Amino acid sequence: MNISDLKAGASNVDVEAVVTEKDEPREVTTKYGKKLNVCNAMLQDDTGSIAISLWGDNIDLVSVGDKVKITNGYVSEFRGTPQLSTGKFGKIEVLSKGSGSPSASSESEEESESEEEM
């Protein structure tokens, strides 16, 4: 399925795309009082792009530049914008690793500088 075909309300969505952006994770509290980590990201294929919410372990699973496959996802609408999600029954898997996010490489440089100071 192509990203350009995704509309709010679509379910059982299977799509392959590249992660083009990934925000810093943040902690949210559910309506049941449970604290969870969530991260917004953008996926892009040849036909367009769509926002995706990454929850829990999926946050660390993907990096900018990775090609991923979403299986059994669904599309909702948040503030008028379609958003893809895996939910409880969907799955995200990394098909190929990209070059990584710029923030990941700058963290490595900072760690190297700290080690040199020791």
Image: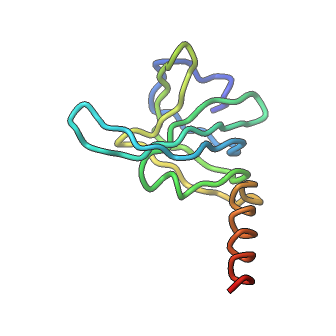
Q: Residue at x 69, y 41 (%)?
A: 21
The x and y percentages for residue 19 are: 68, 45
Extreme front residue here?
117
The x and y percentages for residue 118 are: 68, 86
The x and y percentages for residue 76 are: 47, 22
Extreme left residue here?
32
Q: How is the image coloured?
A: rainbow
The x and y percentages for residue 94 are: 60, 56
Task: Answer left or right for 94 relative to 48.
Answer: left
Task: Answer left or right for 54 relative to 35.
Answer: right
Q: Quadrant of the N terminus?
A: top right
Picture quadrant where residue 16 is located: top right
Q: Residue at x 70, y 45 (%)?
A: 18
* Total residue callouts: 0
Q: Residue at x 42, y 43 (%)?
A: 90
For residue 30, above or below residue 76: below
Extreme top residue here?
80
Extreme bottom residue here?
118
Q: Residue at x 45, y 40 (%)?
A: 86
Task: Answer left or right for 97 relative to 91.
Answer: right
For residue 73, above or below residue 114: above
Front-most of residues 47 and 100: 100
Front-most of residues 82 and 10: 82
For residue 77, above or below residue 51: above
Task: Answer left or right for 93 relative to 117.
Answer: left
